[in-house]
Image (tube, grey):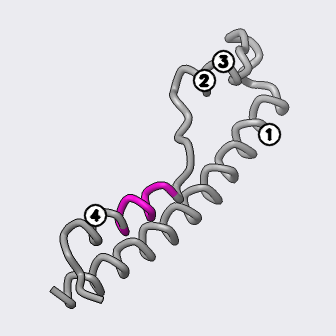
Amino acid sequence: MKLTSRLLRRIIEEEVAKFGEMESTEDRAKDADELDADEYGTDKAKEKQIDFMKALKIEEARLRRRLIKITETRRRLARRL
């Protein structure tokens, strides 16, 4: 099968579609817990911040793996051209 620009574009669109729906910052802001200034020093607030940092680290690792796969695929396709 010959790799054309149309086929390459379709392959890239399929890879990008695998990322899923991105959340908007407004949606994330609605989910955030609001704290008063005097509550920032509490252990509960610090635990939430630590948990959120761990979740972000996991998400970052997942996105890095996907980016590596996309980059490798793009590099392989470019070599064929």
Residue at the location (74% across, 24% down)? 41
Q: Residues within 10 Å of mark 4 (few under 14, many from 20)?
A: few
Residue 1 locus on image (x, y percent): 30, 89
Q: Amino acid at mark 1?
A: Glu
Compute the Cα span from label 3 to label 2.
5 Å
Q: Residues within 10 Å of mark 1 (few under 14, many from 20)?
A: few
Q: Is residue 75 left or right of residue 70?
A: left
Magenta range: 11-17
Residue at the location (61% across, 50% down)? 56
Q: Amino acid at mark 4?
A: Arg
Residue located farthest toward the right when viewing the structure as drawn:
44
Mark 1 highlights which residue? 47
Q: Earlier in the sequence, mark 3 or mark 1?
A: 3
Could you tell me which secondary element the residue under label 4 belongs to?
helix
Residue 9 locus on image (x, y percent): 28, 63
Q: Residues within 10 Å of mark 2 (few under 14, many from 20)?
A: few
